[in-house]
Amino acid sequence: MSWNELLQPDLILEGSVLNLTPEMIQQYQLKGLVLDVDETLVPIKATTASAALQAWVSQTRQFVKLWLVSNNLSDTRIGGIARSLDLPYILGAVKPSRRKLRLAVEAMNLPAEQVAMVGDRLFTDVIAGNRLGMFTILVEPYVDPGEAVRAYPIRGLEVLVSQALGASLIPKHTKINKNQ
């Protein structure tokens, strides 16, 4: 698989994961979602899920199986978030490694191509999902609304390096606008 293919998300979602609707999930025939945690579901310092995220999970779990897979090693923090959402989780995934993503997909008892890896990072979430043959969804990093908007130097660097390696970052599927 070329760098272009590894770094190319299937879908780029403008806004947070909260903009991923049941209609989109059905449109792409997804049966499961593996969700990154830090800055995909919650701000980096959060210890529990917001009411809005809890409502999204409650609605979304009616259509697909959900797992949290995080590179973070803190069982106290990631486990607390998972418990607040009543979701199974895996720590220390070391993405872009496929090993722990594969465990989540196998636990869902679904083929990888019916499961989406949803995350905010190209070099961890998108590469890992693409390496496993999953549908990949790139979302904007989640920022605590109370904090000032900050730059994302790592994500900016990832985009620049990705483009230098030949990735266009034009999604394989139609880009979904949060205003739709």
Image (cartoon, rainbow, N blue to C red):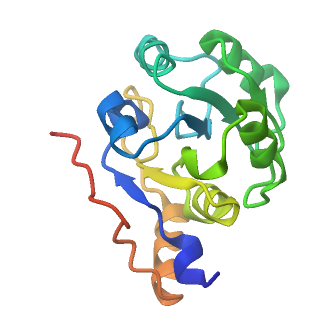
Residue 100 placement (x, y as % from top left):
82, 46
Is 84 drawn above or below residue 87 in the view shown? above
Residue sitting nearer the eye, 149 or 16: 16
Is 170 drawn above or below residue 97 in the view shown? below
Is 102 drawn above or below residue 49 in the view shown? below
Residue 157 placement (x, y as % from top left):
52, 72
Q: Residue furthest left?
A: 180
Residue sitting nearer the eye, 146 or 118: 118
Q: Quadrant of the C terminus?
A: top left
Residue 1: which quarter of the image?
bottom right
Residue sitting nearer the eye, 75 or 145: 75
Q: Is residue 116 visible?
A: no
Residue 174 placement (x, y as % from top left):
27, 59
Residue 9 placement (x, y as % from top left):
47, 63
How many marks the image carries: the answer is 0
Look at 73% across and 22% down and name the residue there: 88
Look at 63% across and 10% down and name the residue there: 84
Look at 79% across and 59% down and name the residue there: 97
Q: Is residue 110 visible?
A: yes
Look at 53% across and 33% down and name the residue there: 43
Is 50 drawn above or below residue 135 in the view shown? above
Horizontally, residue 75 falls left or right of residue 61, namely: right
Residue sitting nearer the eye, 43 or 25: 25
